[in-house]
Image (cartoon, grey):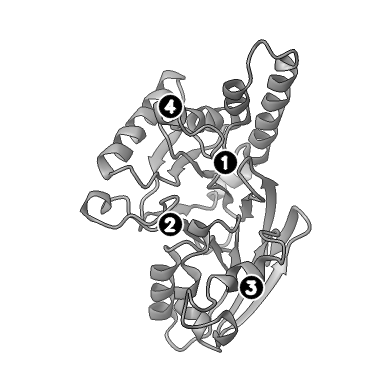
Amino acid sequence: MKDHPKIKVTFWGVRGSIPTPGPATAFYGGNTSCVEVRADGELIVLDAGTGIRPLGLQLVSEFKDKPISLTLLMTHTHWDHIQGFPFFVPAYNPKNKLRILGYEGAREGLGSTLSSQMESPYFPISLQEMPGYIAFQELKNLDFTIGKVRVQAAFMNHPGICVGYRLFTSAGSVAYLPDNESFLRLKSKINSESDQHYAETLAYARSQDEKLADFVRGADILITDSQYDAAEYASHIGWGHTCVDDSVAFALSARVKRLYLFHHDPGHEDAKISQMEGHARDLAAQQGSKLHVEAAREGLEVVLHHPTKAAASKL
């Protein structure tokens, strides 16, 4: 069995809503959503929050004069997922090729949405002035490929049009669901038991959550929205985000191998996130699970290893 290049996932931005720099967020980081995946000869970037700026600087340092070719997958066009793009240095080099894929995030489409944040008086340089080769593609299908990497998408329970992605690599799969709210918890909170359709509503909500669990079932890595604790969620119902208790329950039901808590609330300092991480681990342990639970942090690298010859022979 020949050696394969390692599959690597790197977190560049793990925060939700708005960047939160400062000493109280230095460990987990204050940049908004951006994750890099190196897999099977492809460079794939998930979302363009402010974390894409340090990623771009690192790529320029790594590639030097060599051209960079990458695919940027957008989950949606809320500001915390696009605001770093104007500062992505590789987009200013005509040698580089950027393919930006996503589902329609505004009436005029993805390209228009990204360019609008760079129009005067908001930004001094327009998207059209970026000298890099930038190609936009509005996705129509929920199953497509990026080179040798197969990608599946699923729509999330989040305001507007929002998707999550699952990348199937030669060493395993990575599921990225940064913005999502449990259907069942949402519907059970906003509907009254006196509602004659209450039971039907809950049954539908439960089926939607189960459908999403099927989407990520068995994933090697699950990166998912875990913005609130259970008490905080009570005052944020319908905002499109998940409490950490639901993230763990979801990961356990889908039998994923590793769970990374993501989209940290801007009001959460490092100590709070560590507390939530500990609570999540306790919840998994109480179910007798060996699920690996970790709060995502900037700079964290996760490697997917290809199966050994012995393990591959059993497949």
Return the disc, 2 or 1, that comes first in the chain's sequence: 2
Tell me the distance, in whole angstroms, between the alpha carbons under discs 3 and 1.
25 Å
Residue that label 4 marks: 230
Mark positioned earlier in the residue sequence (2 or 4)? 2
**How busy is the neighbourhood of tag 1: few (under 14 within 10 Å), some, or many (20 plus)?**
many
Residue 286 seen anywhere in this rendered image of the structure: yes
Can residue 8 be seen here? no
The amino acid type found where label 1 is placed reads Asn
> In terms of sequence position, does the residue under pointer 2 or pointer 3 come before the other?
2
Dot 3 or dot 4: first in sequence order is: 3
Residue identified by numbered label 1: 180
> Separation of disc 2 and disc 4 at Cα?
22 Å
Q: Earlier in the sequence, mark 4 or mark 1?
A: 1
Q: Residue at x 60, y 43 (%)?
A: 158
User: What residue lies at 50% left-to-right and 52% top-to-bottom?
Assistant: 304
- SS under mark 2: loop
